[in-house]
Amino acid sequence: MEERNSLLKTKEREDHRLKKNKHFSYIYRKGKRKNTKNLTLFTAPSRYRTFKVGISVNKKIGKANVRNKLKRRIREIVRIDNLPKEYNNYIILTREGSQELSFDGLRAQLKELFS
């Protein structure tokens, strides 16, 4: 029973991710942009009654372990704070310097973007 519940949680979380390149390209072209010092948020309306979030981290940020840590932190902040309030598709684009932010600093910038 425990295993089944953990699979449902994983599946549920995966449903809110943008994965395909064509979806990213569409949102970059048609979406609205909002910036903070270290992050950029692209927003495009969704056809469905759900939201999807994609995270893009440039290789200039650092090696794979640094980029993955940053993505995990952003994913967790979005999950904990229930940041997307509307049914849109979002891409969070990181800039150089974002890897040096603390968890709380990253959280503050993401809340500013989604407000």
Image: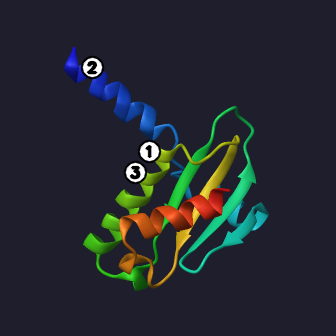
Mark 3–mark 2 Cα distance, whole angstroms, equals 22 Å
Mark 1–mark 2 Cα distance, whole angstroms, equals 22 Å
Q: Position of residue 21 (x, y in %)?
A: 57, 59
Left or right of 65 on screen, residue 36: right
Dividing the picture into quarters, in which one does residue 48 lie? top right
Question: Residue shown at 31%/65% (left/top)?
Answer: 69
Between discs 3 and 2, the one toward the N terminus: 2
Query: Label 2 is placed on what type of residue?
Result: Arg
Q: Which mark is residue 80?
A: 1
Query: Label 1 is placed on what type of residue?
Result: Ile
**For the residue labelled by badge 3, is the local secondary structure a helix, a strand or a loop?**
helix
Residue pointed to by mark 2: 4
Front: mark 3 or 2? 3
Question: Residue shown at 53%/43% (left/top)?
Answer: 82
Left or right of 26 on screen, residue 66: left
Query: Circles 3 and 1: CB distance less than 8 Å?
Result: yes
Mark 3–mark 1 Cα distance, whole angstroms, equals 6 Å
